[in-house]
Amino acid sequence: MRKIFTEARLALIGILILIWTLIPIYHLFVMSITPRVETFAGALWPSRPTLENYETVVEQGHYYLEHFWRQLWNSAFVAVMVCVITLAIAATATFAISRLKVRGGRLVSNMALATYLIPPAFLAIPMYKVMGIYGLLNTQWSLILTMVTFASPYAIWVLKQYADKLPYELDEAARIDGASPLQIFRLIYLPLMAPSLVAIGTYALLLAWNEYLYAFLLLSADKDITLAVALGHFLTTDDAPFNVLMATGAVYALPPAAVYYAFRRYMVSGLTAGAVKS
Amino acid sequence: MASVSVEAVRKRYGALEVIHGIDIAIPDGEFVVLVGPSGCGKSTLLRMIAGLEEISGGTVRIGQRVVNQVPSKDRDIAMVFQNYALYPHMTVRENMGFSLRLRKAETEVIAERVQRAAQILSLTELLDRHPKQLSGGQRQRVAMGRAIVRNPQVFLFDEPLSNLDAKLRVQMRTEIKALHQQLKTTSIYVTHDQIEAMTMADRIVVMHDGIVEQIGTPLELYDTPANLFVAGFIGSPAINLIRGILRRDGGRCWVATEAGVDLPLNGDAAGQDGQAVVYGFRPEHLTPVENSGLLSRIEVVEPTGANTFVYAELSGAQICGVFSERRSFAAGETLHLMPQLDRVHLFDAASGRRLAA
């Protein structure tokens, strides 16, 4: 009896959280299929649902959406590059720290985590300055490098927890079998780390895809900005076309949802790995 | 195949020295077992021969070549690990062929050598499985298969049977020995199990606290242990050891214990009158006699079928006797026992060394 009560209570909390999470998404969806005239009618479901907002988005048929496809591509390009570079850095760093046992490796991984003591927003101005010095402002590489900077420490930390769990005898067996460190990395380490690499890659991808502040700060030309910044531009007028904005938002939310869904199996096990310092 | 020689080898971790200058010469084709309690340095020594640990001092030679600075992969050795260390993402076939693949061998050569090793180890049916689909014994066989496809100069085994259950361990022991008789590759085998050492070795190296206590064939170690440590380590049930003072009177010789019991010795026994000694005899070298002999009280009787183990109290110490004849023993009974005098071992109590006749 007591158990049922406890479970019912947990279920209730779960349902409340679910509703709380889903309401904004529901709003987004409803507004995206509502004709412009009814935008703020406040109905739970539009009287005449329409896909015209999505047509506007796809055909770039609005002032704010002139470069929609280009901006979507920019977002994808930045996200994929951040994912690839972060993975390359984290995989090689953790291999060196955890498997080659490079001197000072533990210090590096602890310091990596310490970078999270400073909120990224505090670094906005310094980062802007640095990119200016290197002449990278208004190029997508400035955003890519910045996001890699923020994603790598966490990626290294989580991957290291995983790398430490691989039996060291595997490396020793491979050394005796005749493998060089690079061969161990390629033929033993990477295949065995694949699940955690997928999880960390997804994390970096979504971090970059969702980034607004730094994208807004570092990129300015309409053709260079990411979709996140373009969405922000909608709100620069009093007469914002909210239903088109919501349709764009819905399209923008689809790729991460798909990525997350495809790799959900790895996400849970991968990201909890770093939860406890071992 | 090649000989292996270890000369004055030392291992230090910072200021702590764990191996204090070891010399072992292993001729080509020999099966040598390094045995000793945990922490005696046997695995460290093996790992130094493998190139997985740096050598702090001394020389390791494989064949005629000094390998101190040679990386593992160029030492032409193969190693079997305690936890198998099979690559989980590769099939049995890929695991076994991995070293040849790294050496850029032809595909047909790899296939043929893997096939032949699989036949020797009866793994042919399992070649396309992954390690997680295999039992412990099968994994151990794959680990050995990975070693033999290479046809290396030396096999190194680091407690390869410790993770197996008792029955499988006995079976694999026989298989490894048979394999060695077939391939005749120089082998160095580390274990803490003296039975494994006794049954498998051509020669045993008994190690303790980073030094070699004795090197010899299994029966040499059993029959003439060089010191108390080896005497106590080799043999199951363990040798009986009783402390006392060596006494000589004319042609007679005996060991007087504190409890006032005189333990008999042959007249030609070594040692000085009055010397503190340890009197040792193996459990199976005790004979029940009628009247003379040492009086002891039986505490526990353990019949195993082939033998009966009798634990009894003698001169304040617990001793064990192993008897193969069917005779009834009962707890509480007093028994007259006589050690076979030519099988009695005498050790100096201070140094622990064997007193040679």
Image: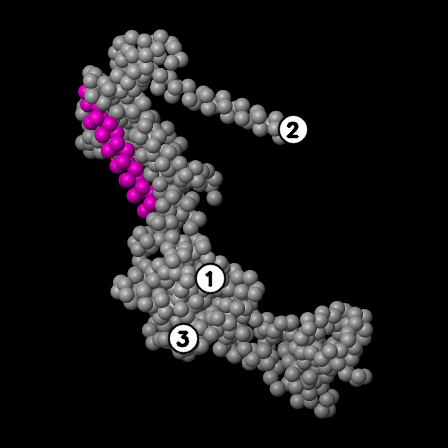
Query: Where is residue B107 shown, x and y percent of the image?
Result: 27, 63
- Chain where mark 2 sits: A
**Residue tagged by mark 2?**
A1
| Quarter of the C terminus of chain B within the rendering | bottom right
What's under tag 2, amino acid-wise? Met
What's under tag 1, amino acid-wise? Gln
**Residue tagged by mark 3?**
B183
Residue sitting at 52 percent across and 60 percent down? B163
The range drawn in magenta is A66-93
For the residues labelled 2 and 3, the Cα–Cα distance comes to: 69 Å
Residue sitting at 42 percent across and 50 percent down? A166
Q: Residue B138: which disc?
A: 1
Of the image marks 1 and 3, the number of the one nearer the N terminus = 1
Magenta includes A84? yes
- Chain where mark 3 sits: B
- Chain where mark 1 sits: B
Judge if badges 1 and 2 mark residues of a common chain. no
Does the magenta stretch mainly form a helix, a strand or a loop?
A: helix
For the residues labelled 1 and 3, the Cα–Cα distance comes to: 20 Å
Query: Where is residue A221 shown, x and y percent of the image?
Result: 18, 23
Residue sitting at 49 percent across and 77 percent down? B203
What's under tag 3, amino acid-wise? Leu
Circle 1: is it few (<14), some (14-19), or many (20+) Cα within 10 Å? Answer: some
Considering only vertical position in the picture, is A176 above or below A262? below
The reply to whether dot 2 and dot 3 touch (C-beta < 8 Å) is: no
* Image position of A181 (left or right of B258): left
Residue sitting at 70 percent across and 74 percent down? B308
Quarter where residue A271 is shown: top left
SS for callout 1: helix
* Image position of B264 (left or right of A182): right
For the residues labelled 1 and 2, the Cα–Cα distance comes to: 49 Å
Considering only vertical position in the picture, is B184 above or below A266? below
